[in-house]
Image: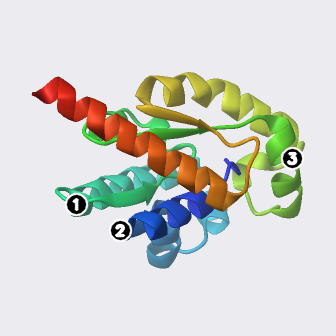
Amino acid sequence: MAVGKSAIGLQLAGQLGVQFVDTDVIIVENHGSIADIFAGRGERAFREIEARTVAGAIEDAAGTSTVISLGGGAVLDSGTQQLLASCTVVYLECDSATVADRIARNTGRPLLAGDAMQRWESLYATRRPIFERLANIVIDVRRGTVPEIGLLLEGRLREFAAAKQEVEK
């Protein structure tokens, strides 16, 4: 949450000349704002919408090179975790100091109501082991611009793909 998934994903897709899909954007387009979904229907309803949206995005991207940005909590769903097993998963590793300014500027995150940084740290502590388990590639986003991180990620993806090809031979 607030690590730059959308910006870095869009950068990477542009570099690679492939489609970029942001599941949060799809949710907003089809269901209204995430804050309104949380307020009106609750987190459980949002997570169900999110899981269906992620499944649809992965299904639509099958057989293509597509960069898909998931909301930070999407990985909590066991079905989503299973679907991600067929994908190359990138974990954008961060810390609270790095996201503090972004969180302070964006008050529309329903899960960060109240003490936003304390909530972020708690959510991150819960999600981090899942991110680490699912990730094929880990990129530290504490330093560097979005274009620099995009280039780093592109290189790591190429290395990963080459290593995967070697194993499959």
Q: Residue 100 — which label?
A: 3
For mark 1, give the secondary structure. Answer: loop
Q: Nearer the viewer, residue 43 or 6?
A: 6
What residue type is disc 2 on?
Val
Label 3 vs 1, first from the N-terminus: 1
Please give the name of the residue rendered at 71% of the width and 37% of the height, measured from the top-left corner.
Answer: 94
Q: How many marks?
A: 3
Q: Residue 64 — which label?
A: 1
Label 2 vs 1, first from the N-terminus: 2
**Quarter in which the C terminus is drawn:** top left
> Callout 3 environment at 10 Å: few (<14), some (14 to 19), or many (20+)?
some
Residue 41 seen from this side: no
Does the residue at mark 2 contact the one at mark 1 (Cβ under 8 Å)? yes
Question: From the viewer's perspective, is 34 left or right of 84?
Answer: right
Q: Position of residue 11 (x, y in %)?
A: 55, 65
Closest to the camera, between mark 3 and mark 2, is 2
For mark 2, give the secondary structure. Answer: loop
Q: Mark 3 and mark 1: span between their CA atoms?
A: 35 Å
What residue type is disc 3 on?
Ala
Height in image: 114 above or below 163? below
What residue type is disc 1 on?
Thr
Q: Which residue is mark 2?
A: 18
Height in image: 24 above or below 155? below
Height in image: 45 above or below 19? above
Q: Position of residue 151 (x, y in %)?
A: 55, 54
Please give the name of the residue rendered at 41% of the width and 40% of the height, measured from the top-left corner.
Answer: 89
